[in-house]
Amino acid sequence: MEKVVIIGGGYAGIYALRELVKNRDIKITLIDKHTYHNLQPEVYDLIANKSNMADVTIDLTTLCMGMNHDYLEFKNLKVRNIDTEKKRIFTEEKETVDFDYLIMAAGTRTFFPSSIKGLNNAEDIKKLHRAIFFKQSFENQLFEKISDEVKKCNDTHIVVVGAGLSGVEIAAEMAYNSNKFFKRGNFACDNLQISLISSSPTILPGLPKEVINMSHKRLKDLGINVITGSKMESCDKDYIYLTNGTKISQSFIVFAGGIESSTITSVLDVNKNGRGQIIVNEYMQTDKYENILAIGDMAEVRDRKGELLPPNVTVARHTGTNAGININRMIKGKKLLACDPKLDGILIALGGKYAVGNLYGLVNVKGLIAYYIKKYVFDSYRAPLLKLIKKGYARLNKLK
């Protein structure tokens, strides 16, 4: 029986898994250092109190149980090394897992440049446990402000470094949430400020001009101080220092300045780019090993024209699905199918029930309609997974 292993239970890994389980005659192992699939784009709702932990996670144990595949298992392990010759995975827990085919889907992490001094003072909210910690710290700061408002009204200044999708969305959600908080309570000490720093001449570099303009206007309407064309040079517990000579007081720093691949790619002797992402062919295969594929954020993905595609859920869907299909085809000796990823568009949540975006490069949308389109897209992904974990939970209880 052929053994297929997926390292990483994120969006791309789950899409690959949903294809692989269609083959009932293979053994599938999903490995992840976490017990849950983190619905990363919705973590900002968690911070803004629009959702809870159950809304932004999918339990991987019950998910695998719900797929009702006789030879599917989930292993909560942290991968340490991969022996490509022996086709064996080594983990920190001293457990080994053998494979015939391997899908690398461990995703990316926030890139903290060593050249920026003091980044240990910044928060990385892409990690769920850090997002929860930040949420608690932010709420504690608000509580302290209203507790001490008669005696003093100290400035609270949150600085978000990086004005890509992550930075823009978290800045907007925090601004909207804090504005709503102070307005609802009519608190006197409402001098919370949020600044968004972009090293590029604009926010959201690379996106259509109209989407940038709509987003910029929304951020300004929320009272966010947008600083463009300047990089973070260093920071300490009180201030952030920019390359343009500006010194900004800070209560919290959220760093969203870029990404790099999971460190596990370093153990593979395959072609990688400067961010550690694995360079793949049109079948999602690595350059040296036909049986090792990389998908989602962990791969450098290009479209048919050779254009580099940004790491997002749409690319994860295309590459994950394609990898699952191609492994099943390899096992059956069939011709592989080339991946043809196309971006469906872009939708950006900008606080409350407000979003902006572009659909298929044709139509710009904003406001409530854009918000509901974004919500529909998310619910369309999450709903079938919820059915699977419900089935898995029922199966698990029967086995007890």
Image: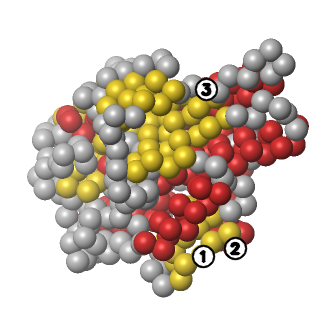
Out of 194 and 59, give the one closest to the viewer: 194
Disc 3 target residue: 133
Disc 1 target residue: 365
Badge 3 amino acid: Phe
Rendering quarter of residue 260: top left
Q: Is residue 68 visible?
A: no
Residue 288 image point, x, y percent: 11, 52
The disc label shown at residue 388, or none: none
Mark 2, secondary structure of its residue: helix
The answer to whether mark 2 and mark 1 are in CB contact below 8 A is: yes
Residue 150 image point, x, y percent: 84, 19
Q: Residues within 10 Å of mark 3 (few under 14, many from 20)?
A: some
The disc label shown at residue 369, or none: 2
Q: Residues under labels 2 and 3: Cα distance?
A: 32 Å
Q: Is residue 49 toward the left or the right of residue 77 in the image?
A: right
Q: Is residue 238 toward the left or the right of residue 88 in the image?
A: right
Rendering quarter of residue 310: bottom left
